[in-house]
Image (spheres, rainbow, N blue to C red):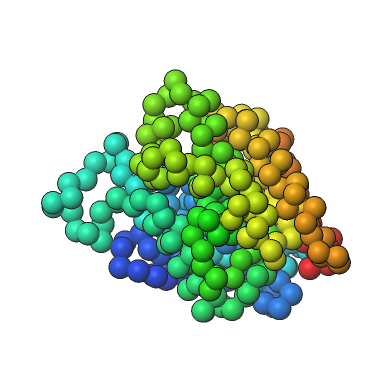
Amino acid sequence: MAAVESCYEKYTYGDHYLQNVYVHIPPSPAPVESGFWIVYIHGGAWRDPDILAPSFKATQDNLLAGSNTEVTRSIAGIASIDYRLSPHPNFPQDAGSVDAREYRNAKRPEHITDVQKALALLQEKYAFGERYVLIGHSCGGTMSFQVVMDRVLRAEEVVRPVAIVCVAGVTHMPLLVETMAHVPAYREFIADAFGGEDTWRLASPAMDVTAGGVVDSWKNGRLAVVARSVNDEALPGNQLAPMKEALAPWAAAAEAGKERRVKIIEDMVDTHDGMWTSGKEVAAVISTAIKELQDMKL
């Protein structure tokens, strides 16, 4: 099939230069009543200004060029969210001379507040309700689950997704910092984004799932997909098992007639950043999620 080159329309939801959401409507979009929106949250350790919302374009192009027309025909729209970032030592800024609208100094809960504002803007413009797949890579995968966790930031006005796809996501912050203790940058970026260690547990999707976490808070959810690559050099593989375990009681708590599914994908092969620079495997994971939703007659 010929390559597809897609474009975005940019909307702003705040004054900061990073408070944007990029939207693409396919040439023949699915009806909002029966199709699904794909909404992406980028990674970058909550701080990398070189990894922003347009980084989803390679995945988007692969997704729309896919040979499975059942999948492409079910996409009503695509959005990619930017959010304010924490400081990065490789990209220093002087608070006294930088315009406040360009200063990167976000702290918990500002990253997730921005994501919720972007989702609210999308709902205001397109009104797709819960019929969206919220996907994130790396820290974006973390935030895809945090969106539905009341203890992170309760926001009843934000409609929660029917499906979440977490690719190479940080699910257990204390475990990540412990595992990567030999690399100080891991503790650094977690602390810069979330503060002291007492907050890491509350912010971790795989921890205390019944205390304002996934089980308590994601009542309308029907599908969770958690994926990792065997060649991910940045995120330890032990981040997947705690999330898999955490999702088991969520799936078991499904109401009668409202099946919940958990899909674990462990055979991706791209590097950590290769997942989004290539976009092929992330597009395949999204396609898998859509097929699961279709199989559930949603």
Q: Nearer the viewer, residue 42 or 96?
A: 96
Can residue 251 be seen by looking at this rendering?
yes
Q: Residue placed farthest to the top in the image?
A: 182
Q: Residue placed farthest to the left in the image?
A: 96
Residue 61 lies, with reference to residue 275, above or below; the image says below
Q: Nearer the viewer, residue 179 or 48?
A: 179
- 213 on left or right of 70: left
Can residue 278 be seen by looking at this rendering?
no
Question: In the rendered picture of this protein, how many numbered marks are placed on residues?
Answer: 0
Q: Nearer the viewer, residue 151 or 261?
A: 151
Q: Residue at x 41, y 45 (%)?
A: 194
The x and y percentages for residue 112 are: 46, 57
The x and y percentages for residue 73 are: 73, 68
- 61 on left or right of 291: left
Which part of the image, by quadrant, shows the N terminus?
Answer: bottom right
Residue 18's quadrant in the figure? bottom left
Q: Nearer the viewer, residue 49 or 178?
A: 178
The x and y percentages for residue 14 are: 35, 69
Residue 230 lies, with reference to residue 5, above or below; the image says above
- 101 on left or right of 46: left
Residue 294 lies, with reference to residue 137, above or below; the image says below
Which part of the image, by quadrant, shows the C terminus?
Answer: bottom right
- 192 on left or right of 155: left
Q: Residue at x 41, y 55 (%)?
A: 109
Q: Residue at x 55, y 31 (%)?
A: 175
The x and y percentages for residue 70 are: 78, 63
